């Protein structure tokens, strides 16, 4: 995967490009390794970064403690961080009270800086973490306040924090209508057919699948979205399976 | 004073080494197990995972141990890869690399062990399925495999249990997540049959381990021990009196007259050397470390095949967005499989393949893509939510051919904290594996058609599994194999190699259950010889 770099590794591995920070934590006994988590720093002089972060993430529950950590990580990696932050807040405030209105008023440099702030809040790290060699410049930002998980948290639990006893996942997710599924579908012994024979590929879908065709409007409902297929993007945060 | 330090010394504490040790201990033999790495409990790995920026890296929560580096430690592996840019990740830690498997527990089917006879390719195993079957059953009951009665693993639509089994699965089937329910109904009209994927992620409490509650980090290490790993066998063999020593880096094997191993010695992290003697020795140090250690000691290679015939299960992922929501990420890392491509008549030139239905959380990956595209605000949140709800990934695990050029060697340019070398990995995707690409695209197009899908990642890029096979291969002839049918080294009569590296062919399924069956069989055999 798994996988899963590999051996199994994620479908699109984060290839290491920089090697100047060791994950290794060399001379420390591994059983007591910390994993590069920056300590929560003393509270900054003001809460500008927290206010800006809450606007960017659209989440007023972001905590001052995590904001302080992320601010420290970004400040160490960004020239002129303080000035950029102050200008960004001014620009956001000029946009009004609505989050999207605030963000839409940013100029190119400000939007880029807002993205720099969004990344650790959404992804939980700064830098480029490796899916393979244990050698990169990534540093931990947050896990439980990572918006990449939080935005789907009502239906997909934070990893390692399952919501129920064994088998809770058999039920349909919140807001999903499963009335179209047969009554016995939850059993692995259930099969929709008595026998199976794989159909040959449809030429239009085959062309679309391989990127050779433009897609065809065959009334299946798929054609309308094919034009917007995010080719080349990837579920880079997913994982395969290993061993 | 005893003549030997132990009846048997096992080098390597993974599932396979510990299961062999357990069989030996149950037979009344004294055993020492040596593990190069440290002991790190499950709770600590979970905390390391939570606090890691490398959520997609299976080895990261175990750290980079300077005296016991793994294959993903910087500089350790000198790679020469053709057709892929990734390679298996290994751990050196108590419990071994089984700490980071998903616990997929497939059996080989008889044709998997007779490729030469059945399809005119590769080679046959030195024994058939019937001989391994009792040990598959023993392994399944050891680790608590869950499955469905009457299951046909062949994908051939036989309508009956296949391959034959002497006992039913020891535990009932796991819960089937909504995502797989939906997918099953979508794919059936185009002829794809979705089945359970047997595993040792427990469906009910078993042998002191709890049932799985869906932590969903199976591949990094189960937080609660619902997934079997060698770490559980460590606890069991300790209670049997086995002397388990961690931080013991074996580097020297002494062979006296060359035919017999007389002693091994290991270094502690601070360089103190200890030498031990035994009647027999089991080298169970993974498919990479096992041949490396033999090469370091210029042993076991009269055939010239040591380290060769490396197989790693080339794998291709395919992802799409369905019209209907799935919400993957609810439950375990993986649930279910499509087996129909496992054993088809054209296996003469198109490899065996199993489709795994992956169930890992995908939202972080889509968040990364959306941020890269410059999305912010509600557009960003909507994009993450929309794609994470409708995405599904199937991975195609592909059989590879045992080719002698694909190999590992000692990488002397690397030196760890104890001045030990790394490995060089030479691997080229075979034409046989590449022959799968057309079929995978055919099936991907059907998956898109069946789900009204939008293409995200088509099946074009090979990655691989953590499965390492072939490097110390088993056979009936000392001139082309490293070990015999009992896993005994042809060149050293009291040295046994217990690793999936003995598998002469790879099939299209995960090798670990097969490795466990072989390990238990070898343990019982060795106990009878000393």
Image (spheres, coloured by chain):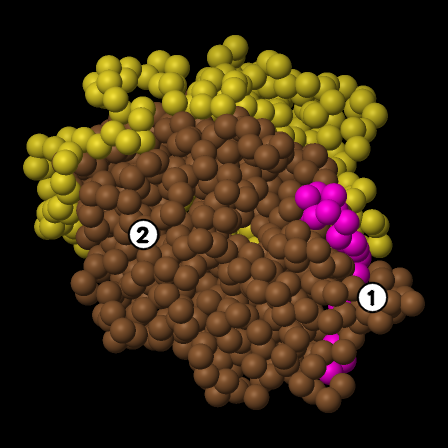
Is B250 covered by the magenta stretch?
yes
Q: What SS does tag 1 mark?
A: loop
Question: Circle 2 is placed at which residue position?
Answer: B163
- Chain with colour yellow in the figure: A
- Helix, strand or loop at label 2? It is loop
The image quadrant where one finds the C terminus of chain B is bottom right
Mark 2 is surrounded, within 10 Å at the Cα level, by few (under 14), some (14 to 19) or many (20 or more) other residues, namely some
The question of residue B191 being in magenta is answered with no
Q: Quadrant of the N terminus of chain B?
A: bottom right
Where residue A52 sits, quadrant-wise, is top right
Q: Position of residue B413 (x, y in %)?
A: 70, 77
Q: Residue at x 35, y 73 (%)?
A: B124
- Going from N to C along the chain, the mark reached first, 2 or 1, is 1
Residue A183 is at least partly visible in this image: yes
Q: Nearer the viewer, residue B367 or B298?
A: B298
Image position, residue B209 (x, y; %): 60, 33
Question: In this picture, is A208 found above or below B436?
Answer: above
Q: Is residue B385 left or right of residue A193?
A: right
Q: Nearer the viewer, residue B30 or B232?
A: B30
Residue B290, how many percent across, how many down?
A: 62, 69
Quarter residue B55 falls in:
top right
Query: Taking B237 as reference, is B250 above or below it?
Result: below
Which residue is located at x 58 percent, y 60 percent?
Answer: B524
Query: Chain coloured brown: which letter?
Result: B
Instruction: Give the chain of mark 2.
Output: B
Image disc number at residue B5:
1
The span shown in magenta is B234-255
Chain of the residue under label 1? B
């Amino acid at each position: 995967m798994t996988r899963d770099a590999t051996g199994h590794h994620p479908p699109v591995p984060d290839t290491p490009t920089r090697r100047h920070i060791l994950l290794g934590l060399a001379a420390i006994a591994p059983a007591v390794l910390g994993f590069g988590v920056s300590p929560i720093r003393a509270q900054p002089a003001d809460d500008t970064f927290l206010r800006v972060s809450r606007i960017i993430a659209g989440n007023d529950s972001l905590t001052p403690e995590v904001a302080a950590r992320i601010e420290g990580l970004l400040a160490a990696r960004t020239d002129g961080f303080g000035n950029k932050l102050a200008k960004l807040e001014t620009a956001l405030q000029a946009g009004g009270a609505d989050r999207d209105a605030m963000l839409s008023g940013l100029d190119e440099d400000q939007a880029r800086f807002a993205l720099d702030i969004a990344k650790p809040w959404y992804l939980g790290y700064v830098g480029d973490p490796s899916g393979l060699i244990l050698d990169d410049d990534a540093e931990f930002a947050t896990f439980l306040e990572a918006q990449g998980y939080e935005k789907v948290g009502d239906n997909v639990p934070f990893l390692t924090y399952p919501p129920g006893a064994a088998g809770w996942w058999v039920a349909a997710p919140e807001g999903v209508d499963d009335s179209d599924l047969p009554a016995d579908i939850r059993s692995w012994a259930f099969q929709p057919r008595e026998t199976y024979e794989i159909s040959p590929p449809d030429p239009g879908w085959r062309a679309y699948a391989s990127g050779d065709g433009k897609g065809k409007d065959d009334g299946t409902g798929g054609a309308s979205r094919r034009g917007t297929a995010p080719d080349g993007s990837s579920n880079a945060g997913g994982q395969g399976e290993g061993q | 004073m005893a003549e030997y330090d132990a009846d048997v010394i096992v080098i390597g504490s993974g599932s396979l080494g510990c299961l062999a040790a357990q069989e030996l201990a149950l037979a009344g033999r004294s055993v020492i197990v040596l593990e190069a790495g440290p002991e790190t409990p499950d709770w600590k790995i979970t905390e390391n995972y939570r606090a890691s920026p490398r959520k997609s890296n299976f080895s990261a929560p175990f750290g980079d141990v300077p005296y016991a580096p793994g294959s993903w430690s910087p500089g350790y592996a000198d790679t020469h890869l053709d057709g892929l840019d990734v390679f298996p990740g290994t751990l050196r830690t108590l419990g071994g690399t089984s700490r980071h498997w998903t616990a997929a527990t497939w059996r080989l089917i008889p044709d998997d062990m007779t490729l030469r006879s059945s399809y005119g390719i590769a080679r046959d195993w030195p024994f058939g399925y019937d001989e391994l079957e009792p040990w598959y059953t023993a392994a399944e009951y050891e680790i608590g495999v869950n499955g469905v009665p009457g299951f046909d693993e062949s994908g051939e639509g036989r309508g009956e249990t296949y391959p034959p089994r002497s006992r039913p699965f020891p535990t009932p089937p796991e819960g089937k997540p909504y995502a797989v329910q939906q997918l099953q109904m979508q794919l059936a009209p185009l002829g794809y049959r979705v089945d359970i994927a047997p595993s040792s992620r427990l469906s009910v409490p078993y042998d002191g381990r709890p049932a799985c509650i869906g932590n969903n980090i199976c591949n990094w290490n189960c937080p609660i021990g619902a997934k079997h790993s060698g770490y559980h066998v460590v606890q069991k063999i300790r209670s049997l009196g086995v002397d388990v020593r961690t931080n013991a880096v074996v580097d020297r094997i002494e062979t006296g007259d060359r035919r017999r191993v007389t002693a091994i010695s290991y270094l502690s992290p601070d360089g103190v050397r200890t030498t031990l003697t035994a009647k027999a020795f089991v080298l169970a140090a993974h498919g990479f470390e096992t041949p490396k250690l033999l090469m370091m000691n210029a042993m076991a290679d009269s055939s010239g095949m040591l380290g060769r015939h490396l197989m790693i299960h080339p794998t291709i992922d395919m992802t799409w967005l369905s019209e209907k929501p799935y919400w993957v990420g609810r439950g375990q890392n993986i649930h279910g499989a499509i087996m129909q491509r496992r054993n088809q008549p054209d296996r003469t030139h198109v490899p065996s393949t199993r489709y795994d239905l992956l169930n890992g959380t995908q939202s972080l990956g889509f968040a990364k893509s959306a941020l890269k595209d410059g999305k912010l605000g509600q557009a960003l949140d909507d994009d993450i939510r929309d794609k994470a709800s409708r995405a599904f990934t199937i991975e195609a695990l592909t059989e590879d051919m045992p080719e002698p050029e694909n190999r590992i060697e000692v990488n002397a340019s690397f030196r760890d904290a104890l001045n030990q070398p790394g490995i060089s990995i030479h691997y080229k995707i075979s034409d046989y594996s590449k022959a799968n690409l057309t079929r995978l695209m055919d099936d991907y197009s059907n998956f898109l058609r069946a789900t009204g899908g939008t293409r995200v990642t088509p099946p074009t890029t090979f990655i691989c599994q953590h499965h390492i096979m072939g490097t110390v291969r088993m056979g009936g002839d000392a001139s082309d194999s490293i070990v015999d049918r009992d896993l005994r080294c042809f060149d050293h009569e009291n040295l046994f190699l217990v690793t999936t590296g003995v598998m002469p062919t790879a099939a299209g399924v995960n090798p670990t259950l097969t490795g466990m069956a072989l390990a238990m069989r070898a343990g019982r055999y060795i106990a009878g010889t000393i």
